[in-house]
Amino acid sequence: MDLDAYVAACAGDWARLEELLGRRRLDGADADELVELYQRVATQLSVVRSTAPDPSLVAHLSMLLARARTRATGTRTSSWRGVARFFTERFPAALYRLRWWWLAMVAANVAVTAVMMLWLLEHPAAEQTLLSPAEVRQLVDHDFEDYYSEYAASHFALRVWTNNAWVAAICIAFGVLGLPVVWAMFTNLANLAVIGSIMIRHDHGAHFWGLILPHGLLELTAVFVAGGVGLRLFWSWIEPGDLTRGQSLGREGRTAGTVALGLAVVLAVSGVIEAFVTPSGLSTEARVGIGVLAELGFLVYVFGLGRAAVARGATGDLDATLLADRVATQA
């Protein structure tokens, strides 16, 4: 397509739309014309993007359309509606679309942790290279349980949330490099396997699982989701598919941002459970039951709400409207 000729043919529409946007008041005829021009220019922008994607022209038309949409529809959707849409559409859609990545991460990490724990149980001499007998006894008799009641519940919840959010952020922020995700997962699970094997060897296995499972089911799932999304971000530029590497990385990067924001809330819930439920006086069955319900709630959220959102066309990426605003803002 001859871009110069196309610009010359469409310049009148763009100028007229700009003129209408510059008026303080529009009568009925002008408002109808603005809507018609908005639709026409949106089509023209689509043509330019698909046949001759000139960056400056695309940015100019995107800005023009963003202004026209705001003028035609009034103020933007309220922030509360935007938050509701995020948690009912964007976040669950992102989790569902990327489900095979984080489900594979869950399976791999559970298998690796089990192998590590079994190996440590079969090789008790390894325990002596990690902790002295006095340190082992202190861990088994006091430190492991005291950890959950050392601080006030509200402060502990904030501490737990900050720590786990940091691990998840590392997986997503450095996911483009691949290796940091694997290292973060390994170090996190190695610690769990070592403590678990020590507790089990010293006949505190039930105690260990009774304290880990109430919050650990949801907490570790969130961390595994972050790891899976991080590896998907890495794979997006290794194998971009039909997109360019930049487009593929951009799409998955925006989706990773969606997941990071949503996981902050998920980890906050697990932090509250760890601070208020895990050290509580409830029976082990009740505490573990709360953890199981939280995990089931998350899975229902993903495979119920997320699948429905994907069926409606959501991907977890920014929608077309927000992308147009983003381009306009960058311009």
Image (tube, helix red, strand yellow):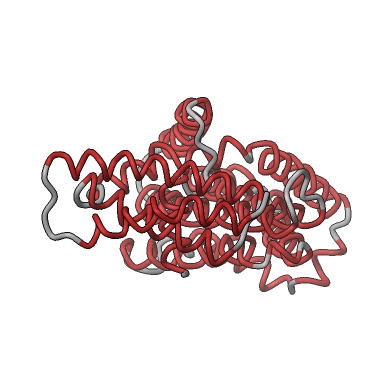
Q: Is residue 9 left or right of residue 281?
A: right
Residue 213 quadrant: top right
In the image, 227: left or right of 70?
A: right
* Picture coordinates of residue 201, whole percent (x, y): 73, 51
Reply above or below: 125 against 65: below
Of residues 146 and 43, the one drawn nearer to the viewer in this rendering: 43
Q: Is residue 169 above or below residue 223?
A: below
Image coordinates of residue 224 in percent, x first then y, are 63, 49
Question: Number of numbered discs present?
Answer: 0
Q: Residue at x 48, y 36 (%)?
A: 298
Q: Is residue 179 in sight in this rendering?
A: yes
- In the image, residue 160 sits, relative to residue 279, either above or below, namely below
Residue 186 picture quarter: bottom right
Query: Looking at the picture, how far across and down is residue 29, in whole percent?
Result: 17, 40
Quadrant of residue 242 within the rendered picture = top right
User: For the point 54% across and 67% down, which residue is it?
Assistant: 56
Give percent across and percent down for residue 142. Answer: 53, 64
Pick whichever, 103 or 240, lies toward us.
Answer: 240
> Which residue is painted at 48% across and 25% down in the image?
308
**Res 285 seen here:** no
Left/right placement of residue 62 relative to residue 234 reads left
